[in-house]
Image (cartoon, rainbow, N blue to C red):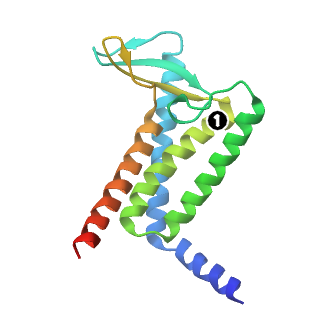
Amino acid sequence: VSILISLREINNKIIKKENFYFLIIVLLIFGLDRYTKIEIINNFSETSFYINDFINFDLVWNTGIGFGLFQSSSSLLYNLISLLIAFVILFLIYLLIISDKLDKISLSLIIGGAIGNFYDRMIFKAVPDFIDLHYKNFHWFTFNVADILISLGIIIFLIKGLLESKIKWKN
């Protein structure tokens, strides 16, 4: 009986009107990410495109996770990482459903970007990264729009947590 009550409560939380707004944010982020990656793949796949002394567009296919970690030619490792990412995305969706509005904003950014990168993992077996930040001979990790939005969502989430803990600590 308590499981049915919990399922009913979760269902009531899912159907909230505000969750549809956050779904739209997730879909817009996914669409923006897809658009930028398609443009880069179609127009810059063979060459590096110079923008200024600090940024280039240079297509790199990332088979690992963020910042190229865990890159491997092993299909077993790739599939395990992909499965883990899928479970993380599902967990983040659950958190979005039960969270307050500010957390929903940060989670929408993270989920939209994560779904964009996960889509590439499933379709291309790698994620196209193309934004190359550099200063002289130092190059930061190459990344994409989804990575920017994931990072922004994490930053918002961390700042909110720090501010809340500071307020609790003062009281």
Three-letter residue code for mark 1 = Arg
- Identify whether 78 is placed above or below 91: above
- Identify whether 16 is placed above or below 103: below
* Extreme residue in the right direction: 76
Q: Nearer the viewer, residue 149 or 44?
A: 149
Q: Position of residue 97 (x, y in %)?
A: 52, 68
Residue at image coords 68%, 88%: 2
Count the marks: 1
Residue density around tag 1, few if under 14, some if 14–19, many if 20 or more, within 10 Å: many
Residue at image coords 49%, 42%: 31
Left or right placement of residue 13 versus residue 121 in this view: left
Q: Position of residue 87 (x, y in %)?
A: 65, 53
Q: Position of residue 47 (x, y in %)?
A: 48, 9
Which image quadrant is residue 148 in? top left
Quadrant, the C terminus: bottom left
Say which residue label 1 marks: 121
- Identify whether 141 is placed above or below 95: above
Q: Position of residue 27 (x, y in %)?
A: 50, 50
Left or right placement of residue 38 versus residue 71 in this view: left
Q: Nearer the viewer, residue 72 or 98?
A: 72
Which image quadrant is residue 5 in? bottom right
Q: Nearer the viewer, residue 30 or 145?
A: 145
Residue at image coords 31%, 55%: 159
Q: Secondary structure at mark 1?
A: helix
- Identify whether 55 is placed above or below 27: above
Left or right placement of residue 120 versus residue 143 in this view: right
Quadrant, the N terminus: bottom right
* Extreme residue in the left direction: 170
Residue at image coords 50%, 71%: 98
